[in-house]
Amino acid sequence: MSNEPTDRDIARRVATDYLIKTGKVKTAGEVRFIKDTGPEGRSLPKEYNYNGKSKKPLAKVLWSTSVALGHLVSAYSTFTKIKAVSISPDGKLGGKGYIQDIKEMRSNLNTSIETLSAIQDTINDELRAPHWDSSSVGTTPEEEAEVEEMISDSEEITEDPESFVDEEYDEKVNDDID
């Protein structure tokens, strides 16, 4: 085997030398993948007084978000199981003024799920924070029980959103048919 450069090696070296001399060589920079995890924490003033009357409405927002998320997950699951060709010859749905690609609709449902899930997680974390402790905000045991019930319901819905929607569907739709 010969150690002499091949014609290809010579051509590559000549091209590289030319590009370096003319300044046309581009060198890639370092590629770093940095996950944006958001803020590390919050800087809360110690003298801020949380309004205990706001805890229950905040818990209701959590519960409502969980219900909405359950319905969205169910809708997305059902919608993605439908073959587009079985409901549309052109891959779109809608009529006058409201026409969307099925593929885009599925993507939008998925984005909506991610958005609601992030809101739900944030509110859940907030309600679990020590600054909302009943002794800190002055809520009554009855108010705390209602808040805990909404948080508990929210967690149950989150664990199995499709079962929640199926039960609600059976209660509402099937009762209306009968």
Image: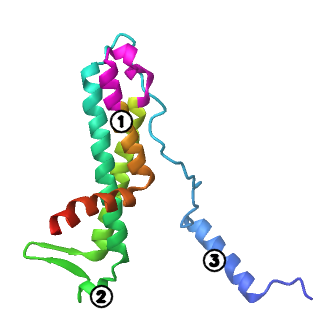
In this view, the residue in front, 83 or 39, is 83
Q: Is residue 23 visible?
A: yes
The amino acid type of the residue labelled 1 equals Glu
Residue 30 screen position, x and y as percent:
59, 54
Of labels 2 and 3, the one closer to you: 2
In this view, the residue in front, 63 or 20, is 63
Examine the image and state in which quarter residue 92 appears.
bottom left
Residue 62 lies left or right of residue 7; in this view the side is left
Residue beneath disc 1: 149
- Characterize the local packing of mark 2: few (<14), some (14-19) or many (20 or more) Cα atoms within 10 angstroms: few
Task: Tell me the SS state at disc 2.
Answer: helix
Q: Which residues are magenta?
A: 128-147
Residue 84 screen position, x and y as percent:
30, 83
In this view, the residue in front, 18 or 9, is 9
Of labels 1 and 2, the one closer to you: 1
User: Which mark is on residue 15?
Assistant: 3
Residue 98 lies left or right of residue 116; in this view the side is left
Of labels 3 and 1, the one closer to you: 1
Q: Is residue 132 magenta?
A: yes
Is 136 placed above or below 151 here? above
Contact between marks 3 and 1 (CB within 8 A): the answer is no
**Separation of residues labelled 1 and 2 (CA atoms):** 44 Å
- Closer to the chain start, of discs 1 and 2, is 2
Task: Tell me the SS state at disc 1.
Answer: helix
Residue beneath disc 2: 85
Task: Tell me the SS state at disc 3.
Answer: helix
Is 105 placed above or below 167 here? below
Taking the view exactly as shown, the residue that stands out farthest to the left is 96
Residue at 58% across / 61% down in the picture? 27
Is 76 placed above or below 85 here? above
The amino acid type of the residue labelled 3 equals Ala
